[in-house]
Each structure stands twice: as structure tokens, then as C-alpha cells.
Amino acid sequence: METRTEPIISVRNLVKTYNNGEIHALDDCSIDIAKGEVVAIIGPSGSGKSTMLRSLNLLEEPTSGSIFFNGVNLSDKSVDINLHRQKMGMVFQHFNLFPHMTVKKNITLAPVHLKLKTQAEADAMAEKLLKRIGLPDKADEYPAMLSGGQKQRIAIIRALAMEPDVMLFDEPTSALDPEMVGEVLDVMKELAHEGMTMVVVTHEMGFAREVGDRVVFMDSGKIVEQGTPSEIFDNPQNPRLKDFLAKVL
Amino acid sequence: MWWSNLFKDMSPASFFNFSFLPKYGQLFVQGVEYTLLLAVVSVALAVIPALVLALMRLSKNKFIKGIAGAYIAVFRSTPLLVQLSIIYFGLFGVIQIPRITILGFVDLSRFIPGVVALALNSSAYVAEIFRGGILAVDIGQTEAARSLGLNKFACMRFVVLPQAIKNVLPAIANEIITMVKESSICSMLGMAELMFGAKAAASATYITLAPYTLAALIYFCINYPASKGIEAIERRMRRGDKN
């Protein structure tokens, strides 16, 4: 990560408050994410890590501060956020597959509707992606027929079908039964090795350490400490990080 | 008819003096058809305006939200008979509809004002059903759709509404049942629906009670099985819903 290219995402002085400023979810956060970098965001619940991630594609509207994506200031009201969201894949804790559509339709809806692909091209891509995660026979099933791990892997390729520049993961394994966590993490690891830029909010410390290029520790809406996995996990400086690691490791 | 003698000794105030039937039964048959037509057509016409009202109420724009809110408040807070009278004598005092009769007994100059009034009234209630149905769709669905780059409109059309409409279908079927009952008020303005048929039979024969007993029986025999059927469909939908 020392080979600093132009950052793909650049967050400057991000503030998010609720209840007219009573609650500070994000308190003056700044961070750069380089192309191809895998950034793991860790921290106790309520620390603002999900709010931070959701601000990156403006699912949360920042109270102040700016977010640059490929050099464009997303918080500028005149920017068409829908256009930029196409290039920022997002994976949610609760999968959020569309229950009234088949798996294939889930994957092809956005690329086809946004005229990025014809239905035939999108179908072919969906099949290729399904094969890649080992679920080629699920194309015509409805989400209700799938296990949690299968749903989340499909949610990941639904985002990939948009050919995004960056993938945002919001606690992607937190709602899974323990025996299904591995299969989802494996897909994410593969993605990381292929060079996808990833921002991952996670409680999986093993994943953060193994796959992360950089680990960011947040607490009370602030970025408290960041560094390589070994700096964060083997040599933590901040007492709050030490305290957090003592609880989760 | 053979059973006409059954009623020979009954008083005109008897619950079951159905001696008017041979002569006036046809009024009830047509009345049922008229009533069902009123209920189904008015709710069908209410669906699109109701959807628009619901989306308006969910808008962030205070002005748009206010207009829809005011419409719904007015139609839910005033009696249907008052609305019907104002629309019949006011709106359709200005817009004259020719006296064309369809199906042999439906006079359009009365039917259309009735349907318009019922549809305007019903759209206020169906709007609230839609609003509830839209709000009941998990916010994660919207977030997933928007994060894929779909705009608000596409997200509503492809992701939220299909799920909301499935959820509200039973409630809309119930609205038709409500309308079957509420439309009896149209008899006040001379629409030849079921209640009108009962009144006509009562005044022509001086049998004061039994025509209404019969009307009640007919309303019940339509609405009770229909509501039970809707309940059964609702139960089955819930079973298939676990996603």
C-alpha cells in the first residue's frame, strides 16, 4: 500500500449527526482508499463503522464533509449519485436479495434496466458468475429456497454483475450460521486476490488479518487507529483498540 | 307458484313474509348485479388514484404530501352519503350524463355519478392500504436496489411495488366487500341496486320487513363467504412468504 496511486475513494472530514446534532455517528473522519486495496474496518458496535461504509455510496447522507469517488465529489448535490452507485457494489448483512425474483433475475435486473447489457448478455454473465461460486443450478430458484450462505454469495455476484470499481461489504457474515461463514469469506478472498478494491466492515478478525491490506479501527464515530494487520493486531497503540482486541480475540 | 300459499296468513310486518317474491324477485336479482357492479367498478377505478395518493403521501416534498393528506382526511372524515350527494348534485349537476341504459337496467346518468363518488371515497382508503403495504417492504430492499444504481422510480417499480401489491391484495379484496355494503347508500339517489330493490318491493306491497330481511340475507351470503375466502388466501400467502 506504500505505492500510493491516486486514491479511488477519498473521504474528507465526514460528519454524520442524528437528532439535530445530539448523536454523533461520525465525527470528522478522513480516509483514502487506493485502487486494489482491501481495507477492513473493525470496532465495537455503535462505533460508526457501518455508517462510514454506507456514507461512501450515500445510503447515509453526510451532515458535512465530502466523499470523492474517482475524483468526483459525491456529496455535491448536482452529481447524479445513481451513476456512481453503479460502480460501487454493496453487500449487506441481511443479503437483501429480491424475494419475488429468481436468482438470475436478481443478478440481471440492474445491468439490463440500466442498459449496460442486453438480457442475453446479462444472462450469460449471470451463469458465468453462478458457476464461479459453485451454484450454477440455482439460476431459476427463488431466494426463499436458498441457505444464508448461498444467498450472500449470490448477493455478492449480483453486485459484481455491475462490474464495479469497488466493493463495499457491510458485515457480510454477521447474519450467517457459523458453518456458512467460510464459504462467503472464500468468495471474498478470491475477489481480493483478483485485485478488487474492497472496503469491509467486519467482526471476522481472522479475515481482516489475513486478507486486509490495511485495518482501520473505529470507536465513537472516530477513526482511532489504522495500519497494516500486523501493526493493528500485534502492536496496538491506542488503549481503546487494546481493550477491544482483548475482548474479541 | 306452489309456495305462494305459504305466506297467505303472514302479517305484512313478518320477518319472513316473502310473498312479494314472484312479482318483485327480479328487482333483487338485478339489484345484486347492480350492487356488485358498483362495488367492483368503483374499487377498480380507485386503485390507480390510490397508488398515486400513496406515493404522494410518501413523498419528501411537503406540498405534495400535504395535498394527498388533505384529500385522504376529507374523504375519511365525512360521511359517504354527504360525499355522494355533493358529487351527484354538485359535480354531476354541471356535467350532464345522457340517460343511456346498459345491461337493461343500469341507467348511466345515475350509475356514473355513483361510481365516481364511491371510487373517490374508496381511493382515500385504498391509498392508506397501499401506503402501509409500501412501508411494510423491508428498507433493505430499497437500499439494495438503490446501491445497484437504480433510481427511485425504478426501485419502486421493480422492487418495492411488486412486493407491496402482493401484500395488500387481501386488504383490497376486503375493500370490495366494504363497498358491496356501503354502496347500499346509493339507493338514496335512485340507483337500482339491491337496497333500492328491497325498498321498491316494500313500498309496492306494503310488506314492511321481509324485503329487508331478504336484502340482509343476500348481502350476508355474498360477503361472508367472500371474506372467508380472502382469509384462506391470506393464510396461504403467509405460508409461502418465508424468504
Image (tube, grey):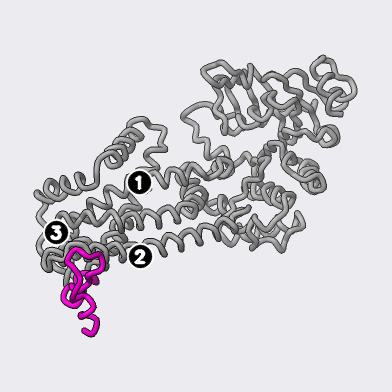
Alpha-carbon neighbours of circle 2 within 10 Å: few (<14), some, or many (≥20)? some
Mark number for residue B228?
Answer: none
Q: In this figure, which residue is indicated by the disc labeled 3?
A: B190
The mark that comes first in sequence, 3 or 1, is: 1
* Circle 3 or circle 1, nearest the eye: 3
Amino acid beneath label 3: Gly
Residue drawn at 16 percent across, 67 percent down: B201
Check whether the beta carbons of the residues at disc 2 and disc 3 lie within 8 A of each other.
no
Please determine whether, in this image, residue A63 is positioned above or below residue B86.
above
Q: Residue A68: where, in percent of width, then height?
A: 60, 27
Query: Which amino acid type is shown beneath numbered disc 1?
Result: Tyr
Q: Which badge, 2 or 1, comes first in the chain's sequence?
A: 1
Query: Does residue A133 appear left or right of residue B87 in this picture?
Result: right
Asked if the magenta segment contains residue A101, the reply would be: no
Which residue matches tag 1? B125
Is label 2 on the same chain as label 1? yes
Chain ID of residue with mark 2: B
